[in-house]
Image (tube, rainbow, N blue to C red):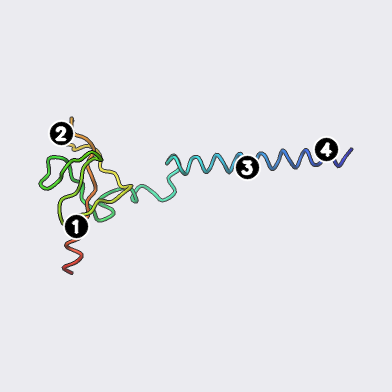
Amino acid sequence: MKKAQSMSLETVIIAIIVIIVLVVLVFVFTGKFNVFGKTTKDCSAQGGQCMYSGDPGVTKNTLGLTCPDGYTSMMGVTCKKNPTDKTAEDGICCINVMNDLTK
């Protein structure tokens, strides 16, 4: 009978550990627990430039904004709404690839 009780206690401990691991994973993947810091999502910290729908060369398609020629967009990097236009949508983070080629 003691062996059955100890297995039950082991099962409870393992279940608690599994629940803790699952909660940590949910926090990491939903962005609630920022593992890499805020600078990884900051456009200027990544060497990019926030561009908006009114900027020269920026076009809008069914997927959203696209960077002008000579620039590429950085996925997962956010640009908040244009501070000068309160009705504008979020911008796109573009990095100049032409500068890198001329160096």
Tag 3's secondary structure?
Answer: helix
Say whether disc 2 or disc 3 marks the residue closer to the N-terminus: 3
Which residue occupies the extreme front position in the image? 62
Say whether disc 3 or disc 1 marks the residue closer to the N-terminus: 3
Say whether disc 4 or disc 3 marks the residue closer to the N-terminus: 4
Q: Nearer the viewer, residue 52 or 84?
A: 52
Residue at left offset 20%, top offset 60%: 97
Residue at left offset 18%, top offset 33%: 88
Say whether disc 2 or disc 4 marks the residue closer to the N-terminus: 4
Residue at left offset 20%, top offset 40%: 61
Residue tagged by mark 4?
5
Q: Nearer the viewer, mark 2 or mark 3?
A: 3
**Image position, residue 70 (x, y; %):** 16, 57
Mark 3 belongs to which amino acid?
Val
**Image position, residue 99 (x, y; %):** 17, 63
Tag 4's secondary structure?
Answer: helix
**Image position, residue 43 (x, y; %):** 26, 49
Quadrant in the picture for residue 84: top left
Quadrant in the picture for residue 15: top right
Residue tagged by mark 2?
85
Tag 1's secondary structure?
Answer: strand
If the image is split into quadrants, where does the C terminus sit? bottom left
Residue tagged by mark 1?
96
Whole-Å distance between the Cαs marked 4 and 3?
20 Å
Judge the density around disc 2: few (<14), some (14-19), many (≥20) Cα neighbours within 10 Å: few
Whole-Å distance between the Cαs marked 1 and 2?
24 Å
Which residue occupies the extreme top position in the image? 87
Mark 2 belongs to which amino acid?
Asp
Which numbered tag is attached to residue 18?
3
Mark 1 belongs to which amino acid?
Asn
